[in-house]
């Protein structure tokens, strides 16, 4: 049986204590600086991963013990070396492919350098995540009676790998897309690229709050530990897909029956997988990036798959077909 590994990091100190019970006895004020000294470690074994084809696999969850703000603010070389160290642990455990979860997939060149430093395949899992996002948007529009062809879309974090690919895919299905991100030059490059292949109107807006103001569909896919927009800002009758972890749309618990907000990039899996740890997701659900890692192993595709910022749209369609082949599907969203 071939195995895989998946890299994670704690979203907060409380989650770290779930990963590593010994840290429960260390005061929080001491843990933050101490995290930089903790090497990557195995959190659990993932068992009972069975495809509907009969193929089986198992794997490991490996923690890269840095918080989101540390991953974003510490020196890139330090963080990248820590991720490579975690990948080598996966390699030593016998994994044939390692998936980069959370912020480990956004450091530097999004997995390319990590892959060059390992002797096993690497994927960010972003191709399947994009496929899941697009499918959930289509379903969300059906629920809210939004005509996709006439819809105005706002993509927050449009120049990241998920946002970029989502923009290129939706450009063939909607009339207008407002793209926003930190760097205007990258937004200009994305606009030029999409304009050459689609009649969809692409609008650059550097302010996220303005970008979503009249949007029928909002996709938030940013790498920031803090919320960027509030649910109260969304247009009446709109659909909002929050792909970010931690979530970047705040105020979601307030009563707003006129909008539909849901988490994006989630899939269901076949059988009863034993993760050996608390995934903090509803039962039966899995992040698309982890699902992609499992799917590649189940299909014996030990190859670098979703790397870099420029995702291949053909690969996105391919991994979606492979997912269905092995019994993985998008989460059925409901209001």
Image (cartoon, rainbow, N blue to C red):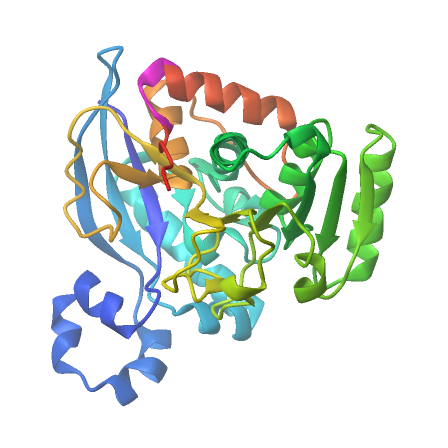
Q: Is residue 58 left or right of residue 122?
A: left
What is the quadrant of the N terminus in the image? top left
Residue at screen point 48% across, 23% down? 319
Q: Is residue 315 left or right of residue 93?
A: right
Q: Nearer the viewer, residue 269 or 302?
A: 269
Residue at screen point 36% across, 54% down? 86
Q: Nearer the viewer, residue 307 or 315?
A: 315
Q: Is residue 35 visible?
A: yes
Q: Quadrant of residue 68?
A: bottom left
Q: Nearer the viewer, residue 76 or 277?
A: 277
Farthest top residue in view: 53
What is the quadrant of the C terminus in the image? top left
Check residue 26 for magenta coloring. no
Q: Is residue 96 visible?
A: no
Q: Is residue 291 above or below residue 29?
A: above
List x then y, in percent, for residue 285.
Answer: 28, 38
Q: Is residue 323 above or below residue 108?
A: above
List x then y, in percent, for residue 58.
Answer: 21, 32
Stretch of the chain drawn in magenta: 325-329
Q: Quadrant of residue 30?
A: bottom left
Q: Nearer the viewer, residue 172 or 115?
A: 172
Q: Quadrant of residue 134?
A: top right
Q: How many marks?
A: 0
Residue at screen point 35% across, 60% down? 9
List x then y, in percent, for residue 194.
Answer: 80, 36
Q: Is residue 59 above or below residue 204?
A: above
């Amino acid at each position: 049986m071939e195995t895989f590994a998946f890299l994670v990091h704690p979203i907060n100190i409380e989650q770290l204590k779930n990963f590593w019970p010994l840290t429960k006895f260390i005061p929080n004020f001491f843990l933050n600086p101490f995290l930089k000294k903790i090497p990557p470690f195995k959190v659990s074994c993932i068992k009972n991963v069975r495809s509907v084809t009969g193929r089986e696999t198992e794997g490991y969850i490996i923690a890269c013990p840095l918080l989101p703000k540390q991953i974003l603010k510490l020196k890139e070389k330090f963080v990248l070396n820590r991720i490579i160290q975690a990948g080598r642990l996966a390699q030593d455990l016998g994994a044939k492919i390692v998936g980069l979860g959370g912020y480990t997939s956004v450091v530097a060149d999004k997995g390319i350098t990590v892959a060059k430093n390992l002797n096993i395949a690497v994927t960010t899992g972003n191709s399947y995540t994009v496929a899941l996002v697009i499918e959930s948007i289509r379903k969300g529009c059906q629920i809210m009676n939004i005509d996709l062809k006439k819809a105005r879309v706002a993509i927050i974090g449009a120049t990241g790998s998920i946002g970029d690919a989502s923009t290129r895919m939706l450009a063939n299905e909607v009339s207008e897309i407002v793209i926003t991100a930190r760097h205007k030059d990258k937004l200009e490059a994305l606009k030029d690229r999409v304009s050459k292949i689609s009649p969809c109107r692409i609008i650059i807006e550097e302010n996220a709050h303005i970008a979503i103001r009249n949007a029928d569909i909002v996709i938030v896919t940013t790498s920031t530990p803090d919320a960027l927009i509030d649910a109260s800002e969304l247009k009446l009758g709109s659909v909002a897909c929050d792909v970010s972890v931690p979530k970047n749309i705040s105020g979601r618990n307030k009563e707003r029956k006129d909008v539909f907000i849901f988490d994006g990039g989630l899939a269901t899996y076949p059988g009863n997988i034993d993760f050996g740890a608390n995934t903090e997701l509803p039962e039966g659900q899995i992040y698309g990036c982890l699902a992609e890692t499992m799917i590649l192993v189940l299909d014996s595709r030990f190859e670098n798959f979703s790397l870099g910022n420029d995702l291949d749209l053909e690969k996105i369609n391919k991994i979606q077909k492979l997912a269905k082949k092995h019994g993985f599907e998008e989460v059925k969203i409901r209001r």
